[in-house]
Structure formats: C-alpha cells, structure tokens
Amino acid sequence: MEMKNIRTDRATAIVTYMGEEMTFKYRPGAITPKTYMKLNEVKDPEELGEFFETLIVSWDLTQNGDPLEVTRDNIAELPMGLIRAMSQEVLQAVPQREEGKE
C-alpha cells in the first residue's frame, strides 16, 4: 500500500439537510487519529473551517444559484446541523472503507 494513494483517495457522500440533498467529495485519508482527536477539541469556528477545508474536496452547495467555493470562511458560515450531518456521514464511512466494503 502506497501512502500517496491513501492521501489522494476520494469518496462521495450525500447528506440530507432541511429536506434537500447535498453531495460532497472528501478525502478519507485526511481523517487520522490525530485529526479525529483534534476535531473533538475544536472550540473555534476557524479551526473547524480549517479542518473541513482539508477534508472536503468539492460540494454542490450554491448561493444565489452560483457554486459556493469550499473555503474555511464558507465552512464557518454553515449551520452546525449541516456540519454534523457531513461529519456523521464521513465518520460512518471510515470503518467500511478500511475493511474494503466500499
């Protein structure tokens, strides 16, 4: 197994928030024990935005019909319910990917 393959791996997830679906691509290899522990200790929206900016590759969020760029500032403005839904989807997928079930 090559470490660069782990770092460049991409996965797709779909979450439902407020009755609408959002699709996003993320880097499963960005979730390490170190980042997982750090995520649980985040107190600052900037830190949360920074973590998600490294995790999320793309999404289909728009603002006034225009694509919304994945940036820490935009992430910091997302409702916590959406962040929670995204987090749960990503964390639920991690064991499956490690076991080769995806």
Image (cartoon, rainbow, N blue to C red):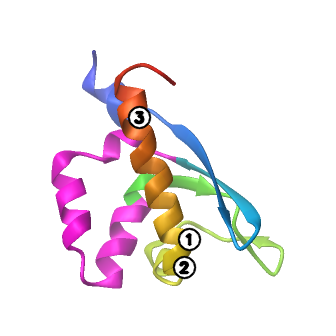
Q: Is 34 above or below relative to 29?
A: below
Residue 58: x %, y % from top left: 59, 54
The answer for how far apart the CA atoms under marks 3 and 1 are is 25 Å
Instruction: Say whether disc 3 or disc 1 marks the residue closer to the N-terminus.
Output: 3
Secondary structure beneath dot 1 equals helix
Closer to the camera in the image, 25 or 81: 81
Q: Do the residues labelled 2 and 1 touch (CB within 8 Å)?
A: yes
Q: Residue at x 24, y 75 (%)?
A: 42
**Main SS of residues in magenta:** helix
> Between tags 3 and 1, which lies in front?
1
Residue 46: x %, y % from top left: 34, 81
The residue under label 2 is 78
Residue 9: x %, y % from top left: 44, 32
Circle 1: residue type: Leu
From the viewer's perspective, is 55 left or right of 30?
A: right
Q: Is 79 above or below relative to 89?
A: below
Closer to the camera in the image, 46 or 14: 14
Q: Are marks 3 and 2 in contact (CB under 8 Å)?
A: no
| Disc 3 crowd, CA 10 A, few/some/many (<14, 14-19, 20+) | few
| Disc 2 crowd, CA 10 A, few/some/many (<14, 14-19, 20+) | few
> Between tags 2 and 1, which lies in front?
1
Specify the quadrant of the image occupied by residue 28: top left
Q: Is residue 63 visible?
A: yes
Circle 3: residue type: Thr
Q: Is residue 17 magenta?
A: no
The residue under label 1 is 82
Secondary structure beneath dot 2 equals loop
Secondary structure beneath dot 3 equals helix
Q: Which residue lies furthest to the right in this view?
A: 65
| Bounds of the magenta segment | 26-53
